[in-house]
């Protein structure tokens, strides 16, 4: 049982499950689910589809009361996971209800472009759930993942669980804020040859910037439904630049590895690393721009500093 803190609620717990094969995976996840169910806690499992089936089959009848999500879809964009998966599940419960979640946002096959957003997500969970009564178990396939990924898991999780033995230990490398800062990396430069286009905008040309983004997305073969998503992202990002980024910005659109990519850069500084990754109360006016971008894009990367901010988002063709 997790001891309560001085608020009377059990604290947030965020362990990494280190596993090498299916047996260790099931040994670390299935008892976790059953113990939570026995304690009357709502349980969600958000892992890649093939792992989802393993857990569901192993749970048998117990699977009926578990919320299952394929992380390859729900968490394709790591920036979407906290607001649309983890907090969406936790916030839908009565106040004070402890929830247990298995979330596996990093798997073999995540691209080099995706990984910085993944590891920042894992680090930011700790801030997003600070003071909340929840356990989020994050499995890591230490046999197939790069050693640096495993090392980063030690830095983003205060507790480690060994899948083979079930042994728990504190992580001596835990430093989530350092991870967020380290992966706040400058993005590769925008291609300076066609089919990329670039447009400098200000308050008077916001509409023109949005229309340019839409026209380029159509020309580059983006499906109509995704064009609407890109149009929303471009409009929200450009508006943020005008309102918070010095009054102007630069929009670029190009094609890259089967994705249409839209980028907006300006002279603003995004000081809150959780911006766009937390739900916004219904009664709050504004503050939803970057959140909306995270919800509609397949990947969002951000680089910010005193010299300005770049937000780049990918949309699969």
Image: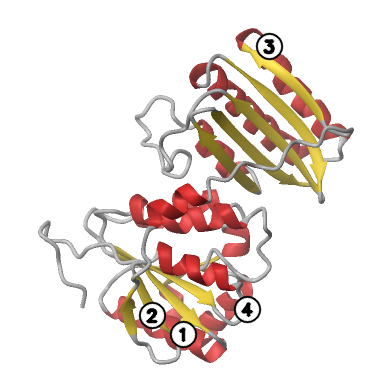
Q: Nearer the viewer, residue 278 or 168?
A: 168
In the figure, is residue 155 to the left or right of 243?
Answer: left
Circle 3 or circle 1, nearest the eye: 3
Question: Visible in this render: residue 64?
Answer: yes
Disc 2 from disc 3: Cα separation = 53 Å
Residue at 66% in and 41% down? 313
* Residue under label 1: 59
* Residue under label 4: 144
Residue at 55% in and 28% down? 308
Quarter where residue 15 is shown: bottom left
Disc 4 from disc 2: Cα separation = 17 Å
Q: Nearer the viewer, residue 45 or 237?
A: 237
* Residue under label 2: 161
Question: Visible in this render: residue 124?
Answer: no
10 Å neighbourhood of mark 3: few (<14), some, or many (≥20)?
some
Q: Nearer the viewer, residue 4 or 184?
A: 184
Circle 4 or circle 3, nearest the eye: 4
* Residue under label 3: 205
The answer to whether mark 2 and mark 3 are in CB contact below 8 A is no
If you read the primary sequence from the N terminus, does the residue marked by circle 2 or circle 3 appear first? 2
x then y, percent, for residue 186: 61, 41
As drawn, 91 above or below 20 = above
Residue at 16% in and 71% down? 3
Q: Quadrant of the N terminus?
A: bottom left
In the figure, is residue 267 to the left or right of 129?
Answer: right
Q: Secondary structure at mark 1?
A: helix
x then y, percent, for residue 95: 23, 53
Q: Secondary structure at mark 2?
A: strand
Circle 2 or circle 1, nearest the eye: 2
């Amino acid at each position: 049982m997790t001891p309560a803190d001085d608020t009377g609620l059990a604290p947030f717990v965020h362990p990494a499950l280190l596993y090498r094969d299916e047996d260790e995976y099931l040994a670390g996840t299935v008892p976790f689910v059953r113990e939570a169910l026995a304690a009357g806690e709502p349980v969600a499992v958000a892992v890649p589809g093939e792992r989802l089936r393993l857990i569901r089959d192993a749970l048998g009848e117990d699977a009926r009361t578990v919320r299952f999500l394929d992380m390859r879809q729900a968490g394709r964009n790591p920036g979407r996971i906290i607001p649309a998966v983890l907090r969406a599940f936790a916030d839908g419960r009565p106040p004070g209800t402890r929830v247990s979640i298995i979330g596996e946002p990093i798997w073999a096959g995540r691209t080099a472009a995706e990984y910085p957003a993944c590891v920042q997500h894992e680090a930011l969970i700790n801030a997003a759930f600070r003071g909340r009564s929840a356990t989020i178990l994050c499995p890591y396939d230490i046999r197939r993942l790069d050693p640096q990924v495993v090392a980063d898991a030690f830095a983003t999780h205060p507790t480690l669980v060994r899948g083979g033995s079930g042994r728990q230990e504190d992580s001596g490398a835990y430093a989530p804020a350092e991870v967020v800062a380290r992966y706040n990396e400058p993005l590769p430069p925008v291609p300076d040859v066609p089919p990329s286009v670039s447009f400098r905008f200000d308050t008077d040309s916001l509409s023109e910037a949005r229309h340019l983004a839409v026209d380029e997305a159509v020309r580059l073969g983006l499906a109509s439904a995704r064009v609407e998503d890109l149009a929303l992202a471009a409009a929200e990002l450009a508006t943020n630049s005008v309102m918070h980024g010095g009054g102007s910005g630069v929009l670029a659109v190009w094609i890259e590895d089967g994705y249409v990519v839209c980028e907006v850069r300006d002279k603003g500084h995004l000081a809150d690393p959780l911006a766009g990754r937390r739900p916004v109360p219904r009664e709050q006016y504004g503050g939803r721009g970057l959140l909306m971008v995270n919800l509609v894009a397949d990947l969002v990367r951000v680089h910010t500093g005193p010299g300005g901010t770049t937000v780049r988002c990918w949309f699969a063709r």
